Amino acid sequence: MLGGVDLGAWGGDGCGMIDPIALHRSLLTIDTHIDIPWPEGPQFVDDTRRRVDLPKMQKGHMVAGCFAAYVPQSPRTPEGHASAYARAIAMLDFINLMGAGKARVCRTVDAIEKAHRDGATVIVPCVENGHALAGQPERVVEFARRGARYMTLSHNGHNVLCDSSNPRPDLNDGEKLHGGLSALGREAILEMNRNGLLVDVAHVSKASMMQAAEASRTPVLSTHSCIKALCDNPRNLDDEQLDVLRDVGGMVNITAVSGFLKAGAKPDQVTVADYVDHLDYAVKRIGLDHVGISSDFDGGGGFSGWKDASECGAMTAELVKRGYDAKAIAALWGGNFMRILRLAEQAAS
Ligand SMILES: [Zn+2]
């Protein structure tokens, strides 16, 4: 039982003697959303001021990270599209090389599991903002060729695929552009399904999210969002959205952005306990199988107690304290994400 909710097969064994440090070191931990400094910044393989670099991942036992080729929204013009696509390709190529032979880029669940057995650190490329497709869904193939395993449909600002949760008045956005997905957005989702990319609904409007959940042949997820009932922010998910993620077999990966966890809070005003409050809420609402962990490190995430990848053990310790058992913690830290990543592989043609 957890807070009055029967976790069924996930329930504790009653011994209550979990050593959080030993448990943490044994887990296949995956952070489902990390940004990279671009176009310049400290090297990934060095111990630097980045929140995520290879030494910090090793110290904090973060086995795998999804690293985003992030494309900011720009005008929906031929010029804006051309530069968005070029940036996404350049960033994916960079992400593929940033491990410099010391970390492994993995394209499949089997490869991630093998890397874990080998004691390697894993880089999983992904794309943030469907603007990167430049209005040409067939270009998903170029992202897949570079190992991308999910694409976030939008960022802040509407694009030609869908409406964003955060319109950009500076780009002449009204509240809505398409009322959810455009026809092109639906095409892009099917192309992603065919190429094994998961559909990430972080950043999109509620209408876009609900329509994407229905349009996709594989479960959609939010790789980095929090809970609206606990913090009313446009980037967070309400109960109806959470229920839909459960119903389609998808998931929400709670993220470490202080302003999404506590309204108006600065990073030093938020703790791991605040984060796990959001995670607990999602588990109680939609079930343990549909919840995971993300940081948004180097993209705005991080707070006192989990300020960088070296401190991942603090998350496991808090989960143990809240009564989650080893099996549950393994599911939250990566097992659930791996399950839907595998579904995307199986659905790809
Ligand atoms: Zn983001």
Image (cartoon, grey):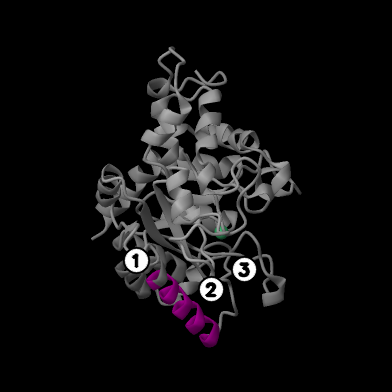
Quadrant placement of the C terminus: bottom left
Crowding near the residue tagged with mark 1, few <14, some 14–19, many ≥20 C-alpha atoms within 10 Å: some
Look at the numbered disc 2 and say if its residue's Cβ is closer than 8 Å to ligand 1: no
The region drawn magenta spans 78-93
The kind of residue on which mark 3 rests is Gly
- Residue at the extreme bottom of the image, as rendered: 79
- Note whether 155 is above or below 114 in the view shown: below
Asked if ligand 1 lies within 8 A of label 1, the reply is: no
Using the image, determine if residue 73 lies above or below residue 197. Answer: below
* Amino acid type of the residue that numbered disc 2 sits on in the rendered structure: Glu
- Residue 322's place in the image compared with 138, above or below, is above
Question: Residue 102 in the image: x percent, y percent?
Answer: 34, 58
C-alpha span from label 3 to label 2: 24 Å
| Type of amino acid under label 1 | Glu
Q: Nearer the viewer, residue 106 or 328?
A: 106
Label pair 3/1, CB-CB below 8 angstroms? no
Crowd tier of the residue under label 3, counting other residues whose Cα lies within 10 Å: few below 14, some 14–19, many 20 or above: many
Q: Earlier in the sequence, mark 2 or mark 1?
A: 2
Direction from residue 92 to residue 241 in the image, left or right = right
Judged by its main secondary structure, the magenta piece is helix
Does label 3 point to a residue whose CB lies under 8 Å from ligand 1?
no
Residue denoted by label 1: 191
In percent of width and height, residue 327 lies at 38, 28
Residue at disc 2, secondary structure: loop
Q: Which residue is mark 2?
A: 40
Residue drawn at x 44%, y 39% as measured from the top left: 333
- Mark 3–mark 1 Cα distance, whole angstroms, equals 22 Å
Q: Which residue is mark 3?
A: 157
Give the mark nearest the N terminus, 3 or 2: 2
Q: Residue furthest top?
A: 15
